[in-house]
Structure formats: C-alpha cells, structure tokens
C-alpha cells in the first residue's frame, strides 16, 4: 500500500453543469488530469448510481481508465451488510486490485467476506472509523462496555484483522480531534488511513504531519471540491499545487 494524494471524483449535477460535459466525459477528464500527478482516485458511487444503468456504465469506464493510467482506485460506496449480502458486495467491487469504503456498524466481523476478497484479489478496504461529518460523532465517540470508544474498537479490530497486510485501513477525517474519539494511531501501525476533509471542509494539506503525526506517512489524503472547482481546464494544474502542498505538509 502506498500513501499519497487522492482525487475524489464526484460528478454531482452542479459540477457537470459547470464543466459542460457528460458523466462519462467528466470521469475521463478527471482521470487524465490525475494521471502522473496523484496516486489514487476515488469515484463516489452515489453520483453514478443516480443515473441508473448509464451511471454504472460510466463508473465502470472511469475505473478502467484509471487502472489503465496506473492510478489506484477506491470505490467510495460505503457498503455494509451481513452474510451472503456482504459477499455479494464483495463480489461486485473487490476485484482486480480495487479498494472499497465499507461501513462497520453491523460489526467489523460482518465485513469478513469483503476482507477475504480484498486480501485475495490484491485490493483493500477502508473502514469508517472517525468521520469528518459532525453527525457521526455521537456514535463514534460513544463509550462501549470495555470503557473505550466505538472508534477505538473499530481501529483495533481493523488492525487485528488486517494481518499485517497494509490493505485493511480506516477512514479518519482530517478535521476530527483524535483525542475526542479516543484514537491512538500508533495502536494500528499497519492500517492505512483515508483522510477526507482537506480543502473545502477546512483541513489543510500543509498540516498533514501536525494532524496525523508519525501516521502521516500512511495517509491517503483526499481532495474533491478543492480540486474539481478548478474546472476541466485547470484541474491538472490545481492537483500539482495540492500535491506540492501535501509534500510540504509531510516534510514539516
């Protein structure tokens, strides 16, 4: 697993209108701009699913273009279920080295089919842990019968189930107070961290090291709106600026 900068590909209606383009072309242009500048792309499945069958075809095209360009792909779908249904999600998404965001609130153990598929097919998972949306705090900061927070329990179980692979990670927002969530990132040294919240949500890439400390070296820092508002003509140049800012943040 390699850390680095990630472009969130979020083709919501307003951006499609601003760019004056189609769903499939949006993805193609985003991938073209990202190739050779960032390490990862993260298409948001919901914005594609909203278009039905045409959207799924466009998502598939975006994924294939990204893979062909040498980019690592995280499908941001936040799937989570039990048994055969979770197996179905694993079969759908965890193939050919893809990564997937997943929801642990039916129990991290319920994600076993996805964990197995990710490890078997060379991909990985990012498990929601301490998210940047304020609505999540009440659940994620809740203290369990063990005296530890839900977020801390998720982090520990992810570390245990990842078996040192570096392919079972967590989602931790760049704007969250780690202490308030009871998180000690050193307790999960093998878990990569997908960190949304940079740019429009308030966190700065220049503060990567300050926010995540030694764990900054395994952070996949996601930018979406902060980059995409540059438009199709300005996206690549904006990504170069953000990449350089992230490098400064790591060396600070």
Image (cartoon, rainbow, N blue to C red):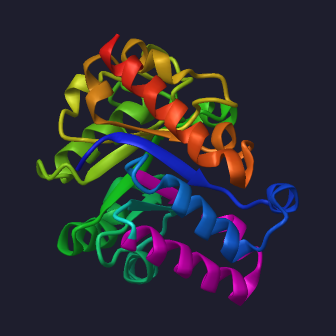
Residue 119: image x %, image y %?
A: 20, 66
Residue 97: image x %, image y %?
A: 29, 70
The answer, for residue 231, to whether it is visible in the render is yes
Give the camera-side residue of 63 and 244.
244
Q: Quadrant of the C terminus?
A: top left
Most common SS among magenta residues: helix
Residue 71: image x %, image y %?
A: 38, 60
The residue at the point 43 percent across, 72 percent down is: 82
* Residue 244 against residue 23 in the figure, above or below: above
Q: Is residue 51 left or right of residue 222?
A: right
The residue at the point 36 percent across, 31 percent down is: 152
The residue at the point 12 percent across, 52 percent down is: 163
Give the camera-side residue of 96 and 229.
229
The residue at the point 86 percent across, 55 percent down is: 18
Residue 80: image x %, image y %?
A: 49, 64
Quarter of the image holding residue 49? Answer: bottom right
What segment carries the magenta color? 40-68
Q: Is residue 26 left or right of residue 149?
A: right
Whether the magenta-drawn stretch holds residue 209 is answered as no
* Residue 242 against residue 106 in the figure, above or below: above
Quarter of the image holding residue 20? Answer: bottom right
Whether the magenta-drawn stretch holds residue 67 is answered as yes
């Amino acid at each position: 697993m390699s850390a680095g900068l990630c472009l969130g590909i979020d083709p919501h209606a307003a951006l499609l209108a601003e760019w004056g383009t189609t769903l499939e072309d949006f993805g193609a242009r985003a991938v073209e701009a990202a190739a050779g500048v960032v390490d990862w792309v993260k298409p948001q499945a919901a914005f594609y699913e909203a278009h039905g069958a045409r959207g799924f075809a466009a998502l598939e095209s975006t994924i294939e273009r990204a893979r062909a360009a040498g980019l690592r792909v995280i499908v941001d779908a936040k799937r989570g279920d039990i048994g055969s249904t979770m197996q179905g999600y694993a079969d759908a998404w965890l193939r050919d080295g893809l990564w997937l965001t997943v929801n642990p609130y039916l129990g991290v153990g319920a994600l076993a089919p996805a964990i197995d598929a990710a490890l078997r097919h060379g991909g990985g998972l990012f498990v929601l842990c301490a998210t940047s949306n304020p609505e999540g705090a009440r659940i994620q900061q809740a203290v369990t019968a063990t005296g530890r927070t839900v977020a801390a329990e998720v982090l520990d179980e992810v570390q245990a189930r990842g078996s040192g692979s570096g392919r079972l990670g967590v989602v931790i927002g760049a704007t969250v107070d780690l202490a308030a969530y009871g998180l000690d990132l050193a307790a999960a040294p093998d878990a990569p961290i997908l960190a949304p919240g940079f740019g429009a949500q308030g966190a700065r890439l220049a503060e990567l090291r300050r926010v995540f400390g030694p764990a900054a070296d395994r952070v996949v820092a996601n930018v979406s709106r902060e980059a995409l508002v540059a438009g199709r003509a300005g996206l690549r140049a904006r990504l170069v600026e953000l990449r350089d800012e992230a490098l400064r943040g790591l060396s600070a």
